Structure formats: C-alpha cells, structure tokens
Image: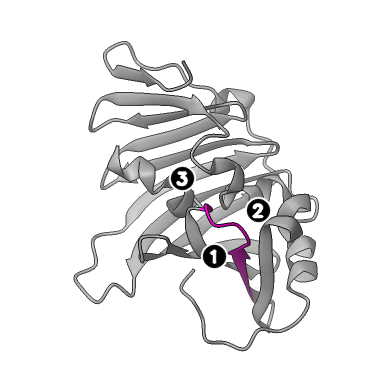
Amino acid sequence: MARYKYLPALVLLLFLSGSQAAPGGIEKLMANLHDLDSFSADFSQRLIGTGSAVPEPSLGYMVFKYPGRFRWVYETPYEQEIISDGKTLWVFDKDLEQVTIRSADDDGLAGSPLTILDRPDSIAELYTVELLFEQAGEQKIRLVPKYKDAGFQAVVLVFADKKLVAMEIHDNFDQHSRLSFHNIRINPNPDEARFSFTPPADVDVIDATE
C-alpha cells in the first residue's frame, strides 16, 4: 500500500526551475489541451535530483479518456494497475495480491494532477500557471496548486509540438521525479472496457467505499 500513498504525485509533476517565468502560461496550456478527449502512451518514471543512488526506472503504459477514466499500469520493476471509470478507483497491487477499491474522489484525486487533463476548465481556479520556457515548438509550463492539501508542491508539463511528452514532479515528500511519455497517441478512442476492473478471485479485496 505504500506506493498508493504517492499516487497523486506519481500519476501525473516538478523539478522546480530557476527559469524566469514568462506571461501567457494559462493561454499556452489551454491551447495545448484544446480538443484533447483521450490520450495514451508508454511511460518511464525516474527519480531525479535525489543526491543518492537512483533506483531503476518504473516502466509501463497509460490511457486516459475524458471524463475521469484512466488505466495506469506499472509493468516493471513492480506490477501495479490503477483503474478508474470516473466513479470508482481500483488499485491492484500484484506483488501484495491485493485490490483496494475507493471512490474516485478520495485521497485528493479530485485535486490531483489528473484534473489537468480531466477538467481543464478548472485549471485557473486550482493552479497558478507559469510559462517557464518556449522555443522551437517546445514549452515548459509550471502549475502550482492554490490549495494546501493537493498532495504535491508543483508540476512542470513539457510539450513538444502540442503533445505532452513529460511531467516533472515535486511531491510533498521532497521527492522529484520525471515521467517521460513515448508512443503517444492523441484521441485514440479507447474501448470503455479498459476503464473497468473485476478483482481476481484469489486476491484480498479492501473496499474503502463501504
């Protein structure tokens, strides 16, 4: 269960930059997210700036579909699946042979980085947005939450030709991590079955919705 506590930061945030912020961050971000209904990609996730031995990266894939549906799968070094149909959230930890069921609004998910993709109209209300860098089709945009219980300190979204290619995360545990996306598909229209989950018969189920 330890990995689940880090979900709001790990699933979608900043290595704080000393760059001079430029105006127009919210406009640039909204232009990149315009008409984004679904998104899928392979990803690698790596801790950065730790000052100590860096563990091996986590590898996997993800798919998102508006509103509120996603499947986030870690394949190595640990196997874990995080699935939401917009109402229910399942966390399947294969190593522990355990499934946790929660409301999709629990544990700060409603104010997590997922809202960047899921509720773009709320971005200005939830975040302070700054354009850190723009050159040759690449942009770095920093979002700092305006509320205290966000679960993370900030996120930098990296776009290349309007595609989200990376997220740099600074969480509330003073950890910095970078998510890099590959094999990106914009609006792939994924099957709805990908956002539902039935726990295997031989695992422990913890239903936190009861």
Instruction: Give the residue at mark 2.
Output: 116
Colouring of the image: one colour
Residue 206 lies left or right of residue 138; in this view the side is left
Whether 145 is among the magenta residues is yes
Residue 81 lies left or right of residue 165; in this view the side is left
Mark 2 is surrounded, within 10 Å at the Cα level, by few (under 14), some (14 to 19) or many (20 or more) other residues, namely many
Tell me the amino acid under the disc marked 1: Val
Q: Is 28 placed above or below 110 here?
A: below
Q: Which mark is residue 61?
A: 3
Q: Is 112 placed above or below 134 here?
A: above
Residue 124 lies left or right of residue 63; in this view the side is right
Tell me the amino acid under the disc marked 3: Tyr
Tell me, yes or no, whether the two marked residues, 1 and 2, touch with CB atoms within 8 Å: yes
Region of the chain picked out in magenta, as a range: 140-150
Q: Which mark is residue 101?
A: none
Instruction: Give the residue at mark 1.
Output: 155
Q: Is 85 placed above or below 19 here?
A: above
**Image spot of residue 155 (x, y percent):** 54, 65
**Image spot of residue 188 (x, y percent):** 67, 41
Q: For the image shown, how many numbered marks are present on the structure?
A: 3
The residue positioned 48% from the left and 39% from the top of the image is: 107
The answer to which image quadrant residue 126 occupies is: bottom right
The residue positioned 66% from the left and 84% from the top of the image is: 21
Q: Looking at the image, which is closer to me, 78 or 98?
A: 98
**Image spot of residue 103 (x, y percent):** 53, 27
Q: Looking at the image, which is closer to me, 193 or 19?
A: 19
